[in-house]
Amino acid sequence: MKHPVAATAAFLVLLLCTPPAGYPSDILPFRTSNRSPLVQIYGLPPVGDSRVLAAGAKELALVFDLASHYVDDSARSERIVLDGETVRLCLTGRVGIARRFEAGLELPWVLQNGGFLDGFIENYHDTFGFSQGGRDQAPRGRLLFQYQRGGADRVYVDRSNSGIGDVRLNGGVQLLGGDRENSGALALRASLKLPTGDSGDLHGSGSTDLALWLSAGKGWKTASGLWELFGGGGILGMTEGDVLPDQQKDIVAFGSLGAGWQPLAWLTLKVQLDGHTAFYRDSDLAELGSGSVQAVMGGTLHVSGRTALDIGVAEDLVVKTAPDVVFHFALRHRF
């Protein structure tokens, strides 16, 4: 994805200039992003809700991402192996602090091990005729995150580990819409990631990251149910971290586009595309030097008017730049 910000900007203009439909839905984007071990250590945010919470309103969410990785690739003097599973469990909260402002906090926990999905994914690939990409030749249940350059290890993790990730402080301001009388909404959001995770185990990057982005959405009420288009995009700036500091870029652009349909009061179906530019320079490996696009498909179970459960599956559309598969769950409740 070479120009995610330009594509997202065009989408936002189209979205906000369409005639109002008179209905704001509660269909929200998936709260996930690229879970590659060498990408999720940075402050790449999900685009989030285009409507900030009302003053005094609160929301808590528990977000669970299970990612399965397998690549074994080389180019010139470089070689990379990403083989294993990553669990990222994140407790997030946000609160409306004024009429058009909100603040939030994310506390992540990261677990990395050899996992249990190798056999399932191999059988899935065989069933549908997909290439194994060498996965069936690798040891099952192995954890190995390794990057070599010139024959020397620049990244090396081969033992199961767990620990706190990089904490994030979030904020948002409503620019347009956002109330029950307006179907369209536009919010300016920001996120500050702090280097609280262990960069040696890839629980964090060692950098302090600041993201600034727009999030937009518009809902429609039709005879077939409720519809929502949503999207966002912005810029992530990073200080020099501990992971490949001589190759790490300072600025990354990111964007997201998606749609949801709620045919029943308790069910929403959603699809979403997430993309970003490369996080590293001076590499001939797609895993480091290429931008990424992934698709997330699934939906939301509306348990009650205040509680909902997102269930989604993410696949890498630009091969090798994101995990083979990510199983995503997010339980949220508003107070």
Image: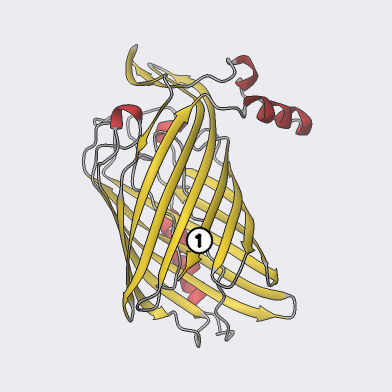
Quarter in which the C terminus is drawn? bottom left
The amino acid pointed to by label 1 is: Arg
Asked whether residue 150 appears in the rendered view, the answer is: no
Q: Which residue is pictured at 37% across the width and 28% down the height?
A: 283
Task: State the residue lying farthest toward the right.
Answer: 127
Left/right of residue 281 with respect to residue 224 in the rendered view = left
Task: State the residue lying farthest toward the left.
Answer: 240
Asked whether residue 257 appears in the rendered view, the answer is: yes
Above or below residue 10? Residue 294 is above
Total marks placed: 1
Q: Which residue is pictured at 47% across the width and 53% down the height?
A: 62
Above or below residue 119? Residue 152 is above
Q: Which residue is pictured at 67% across the width and 25% down the height?
A: 119
In the image, residue 186 lies at what x, y percent? 42, 74
233 or 183: nearer the viewer: 183
In the image, residue 187 lies at what x, y percent? 38, 71
Left/right of residue 299 with respect to residue 6 in the rendered view = right
Q: Could you classify mark 1 by the number of other residues whose Cα lies within 10 Å: few (under 14), some (14-19), or many (20 or more)?
A: many
Looking at the rendered structure, the secondary structure element under dot 1 is strand
Q: Which residue is pictured at 41% across the width and 60% down the height?
A: 233
Task: State the residue position of label 1.
Answer: 332
Left/right of residue 240 with respect to residue 119 in the rendered view = left
Above or below residue 309? Residue 220 is below
